[in-house]
Amino acid sequence: MGTLLPALISGVTALVVAFLTSFLSVRRDAKLRRSEEIRSVNMRYLNPLRIALMENYFRLREIRDSVKNEGSCQALLFVQTSDEMPEKPPRWFNDEGAYLASSSYYAACVFSNVSRLRRDIPYLRLTGTDDTVLISKLRRVSLGYLRHLGVFFATQDSIGQTMLHNDRLISYREFCELLADPKELVWLRRLIEYYIATGSGKYLERVDEALHSMDELLEFLDEKVGAGSSLKSTLETEGRSR
């Protein structure tokens, strides 16, 4: 009996330790799988917006800086109004009209990703109040395009839907074909006029608001999907080193 009790205690202790080790290992693996699942879902929904925002941010900032330094951005002013665009041959959109058309395209890609995100936000795996914060930041970006009778909320969403074909973003060429069609252009003209007005030096305060809001949203998205890496800072560093 004197040797049996210690052996029994030792056996029970070994079983308890083995059970706890297995339990903690399973729990840790489940936590890691859930964390990876959350990151994967958020990457699928948030990263496309992050990339579209970055392209649009740098283009809009370039335009803003040109207007502030030179009084206008002449690259946007090869037409005086969007109504002239259907008269242009296809090569115009890949020539002198490319800066205006591509600037509008980058913004339309943002509208499309924002529209998709608002539609699918229930599927995101955001913690705490992050979903509310995200919706607020998305709205602030939209406001930067709305001010001074710019691109209305409903129009932004409509443009976003137009940019999708079979759940993919249309190409720049397909976008230009819409601009060349008077029946399609009517739904895009507010966006084109936004950039013509900006190129003429009008309403720069709304451009500054849009840039500030995009900057804040990019910081949020970097935190959620960028694993601590700021895409904006990386691209700015690369730009300075060229």
Image (cartoon, grey):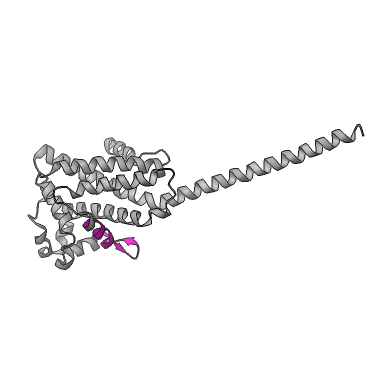
- The image quadrant where one finds the C terminus is top left
Q: Residue furthest top?
A: 2
- The image quadrant where one finds the N terminus is top right
Which of the 4 image quarters holds residue 57?
Answer: top left
Q: How many marks?
A: 0
Position in image of residue 163 (x %, y %): 27, 60
Position in image of residue 157 (x %, y %): 26, 57
Which of the 4 image quarters holds residue 112?
Answer: bottom left
Q: Is residue 77 above or below residue 84?
A: above
Q: Residue at x 58, y 47 (%)?
A: 30
Which of the 4 image quarters holds residue 88?
Answer: bottom left
Q: Residue at x 32, y 42 (%)?
A: 218
Q: Is residue 174 above or below residue 71?
A: below
Q: Residue at x 14, y 42 (%)?
A: 204
Q: Please give left or right for residue 195 compared with residue 117 in the image.
A: left
Q: Residue 157 in magenta?
A: yes
Position in image of residue 54 (x %, y %): 29, 45
Q: Please give left or right for residue 184 compared with residue 20 in the image.
A: left
Q: Nearer the viewer, residue 177 or 137?
A: 137
The region drawn magenta spans: 155-173
Position in image of residue 222 (x %, y %): 37, 41
